[in-house]
Image (cartoon, grey):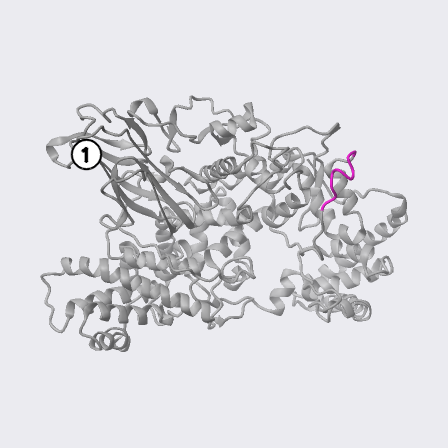
Amino acid sequence: MQRLNLVPRPITGERRHLIQIDDIVRLCIAVSMFVFLAVMFLSTLASGDDTVTSGEQLTDANVLLSRGEAIWKQSCADCHGEQGEGVPGAYEKLLIGDESVGQLTKVIVETMPKDEAETCIGEDAVAVATWIHHTFYSEAARLRNRPARITLTHLTGNQLQQSLADLYGSFGNSSEKVDQHGLSAQYYDGSSRKDETLKIERVDPIINFDWGKESPGEGIKPEAYFTRWRGGLKVDETGRYEIVVRSTAAFQMEFGRIGRLFIDNHVQSGDKTEFRKSLKLLAGRVYPLQIDLYQRERKTEQPPVNVMLSWVAPHGVEEVIPQRNLIATTPPATFALQTRLPPDDRSYGYDRGLAVDLAWDESTTQAAVEFASISVNELWPDYQKRHKDDTDENRARLRGFVGEIAAVAFRGPLNEEERQFYIDNQIEATEDDASAIKRCLLTILKSPRFLYPELDRDRSVSQRAANRLALTLFDSLPSDKALREAARNNQLETEEQIRQMAQRMVNDDRCTGKMREMLFEWLNLSHLREITKDRELYPDFDSTLVADLRSSLNALLDDAVIDADGDFRLLFDADWVYTSPRLAEFYGDLWQTGTSETSVSDGGEEAPVEAYIGLQPTNALKRVQAKAPYDHGVLSHPYLMSGLAYSDTTSPIHRGVFLIRYMLGRTLQPPNAAFTPLSPDLHPDLTTRERVQLQTSPETCQVCHSKINQLGFTLETFDAVGRFREKEGQKQIDASGSYIDQNGETVTFTGTDDLAQYLPGSDDAHRGFVSRAFQHFVKQPIAAYGPEKLDELIEKFRAGNFNLQNLLVEIAVIAATPPAPTSPTSNTDS
């Protein structure tokens, strides 16, 4: 890898005459920009003698800008608009980006005006590039023209779901984070549960047993026994899950709350042995579950007993629920909203609650009705039991119950006027408790107080800080005891107090779930929901293999970044991979597990199958030492490489766009039109690199593809399914490439090794990662909190050893102490 000051340009026949133009451009840029930047600096000085010099140079700068403006109006505005806003039927895209003045000048010389390239050169090109950059193109210009503001937004779909889950959970006991994986199991001799018949008590790693007609353990008769599994199901990704139980014996499954029946097969009848039920679950949540299995003695021949607990996760295939997703202790009851919600606005690259339309209104109403029903059926009976000795004069218990819900939902205590409207009036309107609760909750959960978190200016400083911390780190509202007490006792008034609370909160599973979702966005995994390949070329690349690859990447992200000692740099330098027997078979010796298949993994420890009678082996993931060339973290992971490829060939363009937009956080305009890649059959003698170079060779394409292709080529040693290769056909792979950073400095690469060495230390990569993290967690533009905040966060990220949890603490501190006190704008943004 070598750093250069200028990009080496290939000298082809039709381009030799541009060499002199390039030299002139570079000279003009050097002189003009020196004058311009010097003037910008000197104009800030106010001392006596400097005023004359500064004024003279400022005049020179103004002349340069005036000259550029005149050229723009004469030759550019007809197609691009007066301020680069675009013109219908000509160039409709907004003219913004992050290229330097020098790079803009180069584009103007080579491609502008349209159909008259090379007519705007030399100082004219420098002048118009400087004017464009200064007036509307650069980020600084955009912020100057339209300062960023904190926008008034309603809860996003995910925030609504998380808030209702925590609103429900605020009536239960909090739970500590547990590291023991698996499910607590109790085995009884006989088909009933009695203390004297308990024979085995242990933690089972998974539920995938085939006991046949044998006993499940010592001291238990095979004719009749009872088994209870209890614990929690930990969810990594928000989405719809299908829970599957296969059993030849009778069973009952409770889920979400012990006592909430989920699947009822208490009496086994007929030949039905498979039971499925789907529901939406939230990332970062642990859901209580309990399965009771009944093997009852029969007068006829006993059928063989087998039982398996599996699921179909989002973007996955059916698999036995892994040990890493099972928790051995039972978490508090929780609630998962099933109401279908409309998609959120993503025009700025992250979810924002902007749309207020019929679909949003109807869905929030239905969500309120759903929550009210579960409150009547579960929360209200629990509350009555806890407060059975309290006075109930004038329905005091009911008012107390609804008042507690309202205080959490409104993120602070109610005033008298609110209490009268949201509680007293609704209760007095009906004599039936259930109807009164539903009336109250419908008005509470449809109130702007609940739906618009920023409407809390009347709250105390500590309460507002608590509200921002919960919204930033959990996508939710303050519900746990420690955070609510800190707000109530005014213990979140200083930056240090807020930081200490944030340090506690980043260890919560809810924050872990949000971290994982942020990494999915950063890697653009949402676009890789289905990866399919040519069946003739890759017959063994199927959906089960893709599911293993996705799980393998998720485990890598957990270890490299999400864990408390994670390090952003490990994303490109991880010396381990998670593999499985299935992956090892497809990807060969470099992905071998190194252990027997008769083991199951919980992400840290192993439990031999032989220790559990009847336990069946699964295709469990195993962490092993990575071997070159698969030792570059996400850059060499087959899930990403196969997702950024066509069904039969690689795609340097997809990979290049991914690296520029996501890894490096750069602005990249969408293409003018989609095109079909050149078929290998049409050019059998060309490599993929050569075909891409041929198809994107026109000057209009090269404006973007000179950047895209040069990065995408560095990953060409990984084929369409992510397997390493050194040749394509009979030709050696050329994985060389280059990149021009935001400072105009060029870096050259010989392949993935160089790229993996460059990215961990890249200023652009740091800026892109920190920016995306802030946007994902705060859902506001970081510039709205101060023009210096992004640079400050980047420095703290580096000083904190590139640790994501440390970064999130600092992001939470910024979000919890927002700039005062301009009123938030509604439905308009930076």
Instruction: Establish if 267 lies above or below 375.
Output: above
Residue under pointer 1: 296
Asked whether residue 489 appears in the rendered view, the answer is: no
Q: Position of residue 4 (x, y in %)?
A: 73, 41
Kind of residue indicated by mark 1: Arg
Q: Position of residue 314 (x, y in %)?
A: 45, 46
Quadrant occupied by the N terminus: top right
Q: Is residue 678 magenta?
A: yes
- For the stretch drawn in magenta, the main secondary structure is loop
Q: Which residue: 28% across, 74% down? A: 422
Region of the chain picked out in magenta, as a range: 677-685
Q: Is residue 104 magenta?
A: no
Q: Is residue 468 left or right of residue 573?
A: left
Quadrant occupied by the C terminus: bottom right
Q: Position of residue 318 (x, y in %)?
A: 43, 39
Q: Is residue 255 left or right of residue 552?
A: left
Closest to the observer, 464 or 588: 588
